[in-house]
Image (spheres, grey):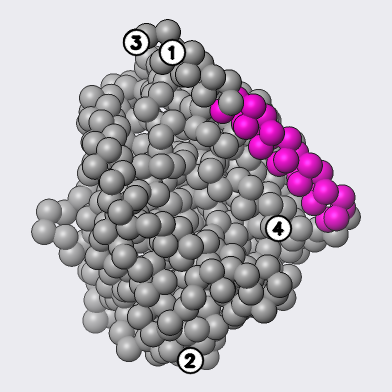
Amino acid sequence: MNKVSVTARLLLVALLGILQKCYETVYSVIHFVLAVVYWGRGKQVPPITNELILKSATKLAQEIREGKLKSEDVMKAYIARIVEVDPIINATVERRFADALKEAREADALIASGIYTKQQLAEEKPLLGVPLSVKVLLTVKGFRSTAASLLFKDVKAAEDAPTVAIMKNAGAIVLATTNSAEMGMNFETNNKAHGKTSHPYDTSRTSGGSSGGESALISAGGSIIGLGNDMLGSIRVPCHFTGLFGHKPTRGLVSADGCFPVPDPKIQSFIYTGPMCRYAEDLVTTMSVLTSQNEKPVKFGKQVNFSKLKLFYLLSEDVPLSFPPTEEYQEAIKKVISYFQTTYGVNAKEVKLPILRSTNMITLHSLLSGVDDVAKVLTAGKKDINKFTELLKLFIGSSTLTLGPVVAMSLGKFPLWYRKSKVPYYKKLAQEVDEQFDKLLDEQSVLIMPTFPFSAPYHNEIPVLLPSTWYTSVFNVLGLPSTQCPLGLNKQGLPFGIQIVSRRNNDPLTIACAVELEKVYGGWVPLGNKLSVRTKC
C-alpha cells in the first residue's frame, strides 16, 4: 500500500469518526427534546390482580386438562385484562371475545367428556384452552388482514397462516389480533389504520416494532402467548423493550408463510415467524408445537449439561451510526457471563468481529437485490405509488402512508445498475460473515450479545436509532437461531434483555439458556414489582 493510499485511508477514518460524533450529538439533542416533551406524561397500566394471568401458558394448559381450571375462567380473566389495559396501550386490532368464550366452553366440555386421556391431550392438544394473540401481519381466517395500512383496511383473510393453524390445532384459542408497524416497515408501532401502540410500563415510550402490539399486550398481561414475525429483529427488539422472551428460529425450522402482504420470494428467506411470551418455559412449549409437523422432529426441553457449554460474548462493534450498549447494560451482560462461569465452571471469551461493521450494508443489499419494485411488493401490486411524491406528501402530512414504507419504497428506487453492481461484493461479504460464525459456534456453543443498545426509546425516537438494528438483523441474513431473554429492569425501571445465539438448528440450546437465566434474573417483571437486574446479581 503506497503513501497516498495510506493517507486516503486515514483521512476516511477521520471523517467517519467526525460523522459518528456529529450523529451522536444529533441523537443526544433529539433525546433531550423528547424527554422534555414527554416529561410527566407517561402512564402505566394497572398492576395485575388476577392470579390466573400470572401463570404460564404451559401451566394453564396443564391445569385445564387436569380439570383444576376451566378454560372459560382463564378466557374471562384475559378478556377483562384486555378491556382494562387496551385503552391505555392500544395494542389490539380485532377481538373475538364471544367466539373465544364459546371455544373455551367447548374445550372444557371436551375435557369433561373423557374422550381423551390427560396424556393424549398433553400430546395432541398441549395448548388446549389457552388464549393466543396474533400479530396482524399474519393471517387469521375471517379476521381483517390490514397489514396495519389504510391501503388494506377492508381485506379479510381467507385462511389461517400455517403457524396459526398449527397453534389452533394444538388447542390454542385466538383471542385477538394485534397492532404492527405499517407493512412491518418500522421498529415503532404507529400507523394510520390502527393508531399508536404504547409501552405498558411508560406510555411515553414505544413498545417497539414491528410486533409492538404483541409485545405491549403480552407484557401488560392481556395475552399469555403470541405469534409475531421477524425480518430485522421485529420479534426480538419489541420483546427486549417490554421484558419478554421471544425467539427467531433457524431459517426454515418454522413456516414463515401466511404473511400479508405476501413478501417477494427473494426476501422471504429473511422473514421468520416465532413465539413471544412472558415465561421461558412457554418458548419450549410453543416451539415444540410449531415444529411438531416437521419431517425431522426437534426436541425442546431436553436437560442441558451447562458445564459443557462453550460461551462467547460480544458487547459491540463499530458499526457506522450505531451505538454501543449503555454501561449498565454491558455490566449486566458481564454478570450473565460470570454466572455461567461461577455456577458451571465454563470458560467464556469475549469476541470481536470487525466484519460485522458492514452488517447494515450487507442487510440492505441482501434485501434489495433483485427486487425491482419495492412499492409493488409492499402494496401487493395493487397501487401505483410515486415514491418521491409520497415522500413529499409525508413531510407535509397528507400521505396515507407512514415513514417506514415510504423510506423502504424510496430505497428500492436506488438505480438498479448500482444495486446489481454492489450485490456480488456484499454477497461475498455475507458469506465471509457466515463462515466466521460457523467457525466460532459449534453444537455446544452460544454467543451472548445485546438485542439493542438501549431500553425502550420515547415515541418518535426510533428513526435515529435504526442503524443500531444491526445487533438483530445480522441473524436474519445468516439464518441463525436467536432467543431474546429479559434481564429485569434498569435504573429507569424499564426492561432490557440479551440475545442468545447459536449455530443453525441449535434452537433448543439457546432456549435452554433462556430458561436457565430466568431462574436467576426472574424473567418478565410484572408492574408493581420493582425487582431489577441489580438485585439479582
Q: Label 3, on which residue?
A: 1
| Whole-number angstrom distance, CA of label 1 to CA of label 4 | 46 Å
Amino acid type, label 4: His
Inspect the magenta stretch and tell me whether residue 17 lies in it: yes
Residues marked 1 and 2 touching at CB (< 8 Å):
no
Amino acid type, label 2: Asp
Secondary structure of the residue carrying numbered label 3: loop
Q: Is residue 199 left or right of residue 340?
A: right
Q: Which residues are magenta?
A: 16-39
| Whole-number angstrom distance, CA of label 2 to CA of label 3 | 61 Å
Residue at 73% across, 35% down: 25
Give how far across and how far down residue 102 sits, in percent: 45, 90
Residue at 45% across, 58% down: 411
Is tag 2's residue or tag 3's residue first in the polypeptide sequence?
A: 3
| Whole-number angstrom distance, CA of label 2 to CA of label 4 | 28 Å
Secondary structure of the residue carrying numbered label 2: loop
Q: Label 1, on which residue?
A: 4
Q: Label 4, on which residue?
A: 459
Asked where in the image residue 354 lies, by quadrant, the reply is: top left
Inspect the magenta stretch and tell me whether residue 267 lies in it: no
